Image (cartoon, rainbow, N blue to C red):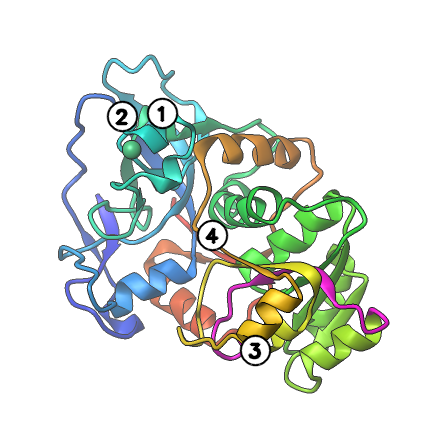
Amino acid sequence: MWAVRFHQHGGPDVLRYEEAPEPDLAPGDVLVRVRACALNHLDLWARHGLPNVHIPMPHIAGSDIAGEVIGAAATGVPIGRRVMLQPGLSCGRCEPCLSGRDNECPCYEVLGYRNHDGGYAELVKVPAANLIPIPDEIDFVHAAAFPLTFLTAWHMLVTRAGLNRGEDVLVLAAGSGVGQAAIQIASLHGARVFATAGSDEKLQRARELGASEVIHHYEQDIAEEIKRLTNRRGVDVVIEHVGEATWPKSVRSLARGGRLVTCGATTGRRGTLDLAALFSKQLTIHGSYMGTKGELMRVARFFFTGHLKPVIDRTFPLAEAAAAHRRMEESGQFGKIVLEVH
Ligand code: ZN
């Protein structure tokens, strides 16, 4: 099969479009013909390499996949079924897995990261439990753009923060995958959404997605703007994934009793915290990583009924994965960048 692989860590140039062996199916695995695979920051981390993360080479990245089932040894899955894939892989036998918290499994991994080849290829294998059938009216590009970011944003807002109707939510980086998903999910839950972005065009797009107020994060002070827009009260929930560059402002934007949820640290891992503010304002800091299989099925209902829709920035053919990575690294995108596989 044709695939985009890297044989060493490095810049986008290490991505090679080349022939690769087809995946070997284990019992319970399903073979899927990939039609589309969306990019995530995780793909960039995998390509770059991270300390203490071993990735066997050569490696195929790609966690967000849609396609058609073409081979399913004794799993009962119909051949030809159009599907999107659950990106989370877990053991299915441990206490967290059996309690429905599979993203807390000690063996939890993400498709296309570390030991599992992903969707930058014509074929990918996954356990049958990872298939989510998609309706005919949903195209493969949008289906591939949905799972990881909408699952992540749902877990952050609904499960971790316990968002209530009428609350105020600050979403950082509206143009990012998690940002565009979080604006939509928070709006769906009756929240008032404040969003930040780095250009006027992105701020306008954030408004169109449901943000009531927008903040230019290069030209305005996020915390000061939040204080001004909320009559000095602050917001109930902050959706943080930028990290070091925004952390202090994110904490300062919280109202008394506010919750900050973080799922990433794209700009750096160090964040300071004023402990007096933490206890006196009764703040809560939540870490969040992916979400459960059940949560993805729940949030997918809103996708299939048209209440949530991933924003597509642009598509590239699989062979141009390096150009797609460059676009993501330049941070120019609004929404998801998707590779199409024909
Ligand atoms: Zn487990």
Q: Which residue is mark 3?
A: 248
Q: Give the alpha-carbon distance from disc 4 to disc 1, as whole Å.
A: 19 Å
Picture layout, residue 14 above or below residue 224: above
Q: Give the alpha-carbon distance from disc 1 to disc 3, as whole Å.
A: 37 Å
Q: Is residue 14 left or right of residue 58?
A: right
Could you say where residue 34 lies in the image, as x and y percent from the top left?
36, 40
Q: Give the alpha-carbon distance from disc 2 to disc 3, as whole Å.
A: 40 Å
Mark 1 Cβ and ligand 1 under 8 Å apart: yes
| Quadrant assignment, res 221 | bottom right
Mark 2 Cβ and ligand 1 under 8 Å apart: yes
* Magenta-colored span: 230-247
Q: Which residue is mark 2?
A: 93
Residue at the extreme bottom: 219
Q: Is residue 120 left or right of residue 163?
A: left
Question: Residue, x 59% and y 36% (percent of image)?
Answer: 299
Which of the two discs, 1 and 3, labels the residue nearer the N terminus? 1
Amino acid on which disc 4 is placed: Ser
Regarding mark 4 in the picture, which secondary structure is present there? loop
User: Are circles 4 and 1 on residues that touch, CB within 8 Å?
Assistant: no
Picture layout, residue 322 above or below residue 33: below
Q: Which residue is mark 1?
A: 98
Which of the two discs, 4 and 3, labels the residue nearer the N terminus? 3
**Front-most of 287 and 17?**
287
Could you say where residue 204 lies in the image, as x and y percent from the top left?
76, 68
